[in-house]
Amino acid sequence: MEKKDLAKFTKEELLDLAKKLKIIGRYAYTKEELIDKIIKKYKALDKKEKTKKEKAKKEKTKVTKVKEKKLPKIIEKVKKVITRGRKKKVEKPVPLTLEEKRIEERPPRPYWEAPVEPSQALPQPEREEVKVAVAPPPEERFVFPRVYGDTKIVLLVRDPWWLHAYWEVNREKEKEIRRMLGDDVYARSKYILRVYDITDIEFDGTNAHSYFDIEITPGADNWYIEVGKPNRTWCVDLGIFTPEKKFFLVCRSNIVRTPRFGMSEITDEEWMSLEEDYWKLYGVAGGFGLGSSPIKIKRAFKRRFKEEISSGAPWSLFSFMERKKERKFWLVVNTELIVYGATEPDATVTVQGKPIKLRNDGTFTLRFALPDGTQYIPVEATSRDGVDKRRITPIVSRRTE
């Protein structure tokens, strides 16, 4: 392969070719360096192939010469064996004597068996039936394909601050974009993820509250995205950013919402009895008796106070001390579990015995609260005709210390 032929390839195509040739450190090279490395690799492979062919040819010639030298000796040995077999004398049969002839002509005696009484018959051993267990055929393990030949991006929620996106762009879509931009512009452009905050709006591609871009490395097919904002709605576009700072959309993701973080800001009010209100309520309730004088009230309260203290009973009247101001420092840790997967779009899927709805491409995503303990999450898929079934049960344990 010539250098001018490789120059027509894009950097992504050269990276794919370098990956097949097992060139180490390929992502760090420029396009020119990649071309030089690929040409050197091809030359080394050609040289290795020629050496192998020459060696095989020499071995073949050597074996042929050895066979030609040994062939006359082998022919001579075969001739001797054939000649020796022909010279063998056939021995004539010896004539029988008169006595031997009489013995041969005598008729054979009949075979006689003595009768056996049933009581004398030997018991026959019972035949044991040997059962051979046939092992069931090995179950064919289902392996998810690496690619599906689609052009799409899927967005998932990891926690209140992080998202995870994975995508696929098929060859036809790449060729279409290359024709639209041109080979030169396409080679100098970059793939980016544009992350939109679309909380509480109907997103049309232009009316997001805000957005930010993430440049992705060539060959990447998934990315963790730090949004840093709980309880917000997000959408992600996969696109191409040209040197002229123009953005061309390739595909748009589904819409997700990050969960809340922390405790509710609405708290219950705390109530306490004031000293003045307590005296009023105690007097109205008849604690001191109707028409009692202040001296009697004071004596009655002291007597009641001593009785409650000496009895050891729990009691609570009111606090004469000022309440301490509560500090606002706090920490809350919550855990959620995300279960996602894929199957045939027309299949029926149940999770923990409950049917779930699949997307058009057969994928699904579920979020579970994850308390302390062990959680069993059986996922079962059944084909449309009900013949095939697959069951996978993730077992997740959580312990908080």
Image (cartoon, rainbow, N blue to C red):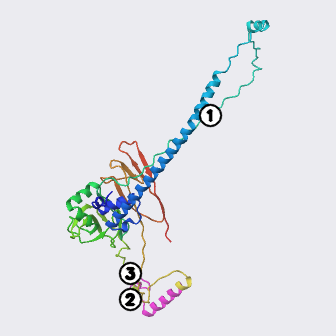
Q: Give the numbered dot on residue 348.
A: none
Q: Position of residue 54 (x, y in %)?
A: 46, 50
In primary-sequence order, the first of circles 1 and 2 is 1
Residue in the image at 25% along x and 61% along y: 250
Instruction: State yes or no: residue 249 in magenta.
Output: no
Determine the image quadrant of residue 1: bottom left
Determine the image quadrant of residue 40: bottom left
Q: Residue furthest bottom?
A: 295
Does residue 156 show up? Answer: no
Does 124 sit left or right of 333 as displayed?
right
Mark closer to the observer (3, 1): 1
Does residue 370 show up? Answer: yes
Instruction: State yes or no: residue 283 in magenta.
Output: yes
Q: Position of residue 265 (x, y in %)?
A: 34, 76
Determine the image quadrant of residue 364: bottom left
* Part of the protein shown in magenta: 280-307
Q: What residue is shown with label 2?
A: 276
Q: Give the numbered dot on residue 271.
A: 3
Q: Position of residue 6 (x, y in %)?
A: 30, 60
Q: Main secondary structure of the magenta part?
A: helix
Mark 2 residue crowding within 10 angstroms, few (<14) / some (14–19) / many (20+)? few
* Label 3 element class: loop
User: Decide: marks 1, 2 in contact (CB < 8 A)?
Assistant: no
200, 313: nearer the viewer: 200
Q: What residue is shown with label 1?
A: 130
User: Decide: marks 3, 2 in contact (CB < 8 A)?
Assistant: no
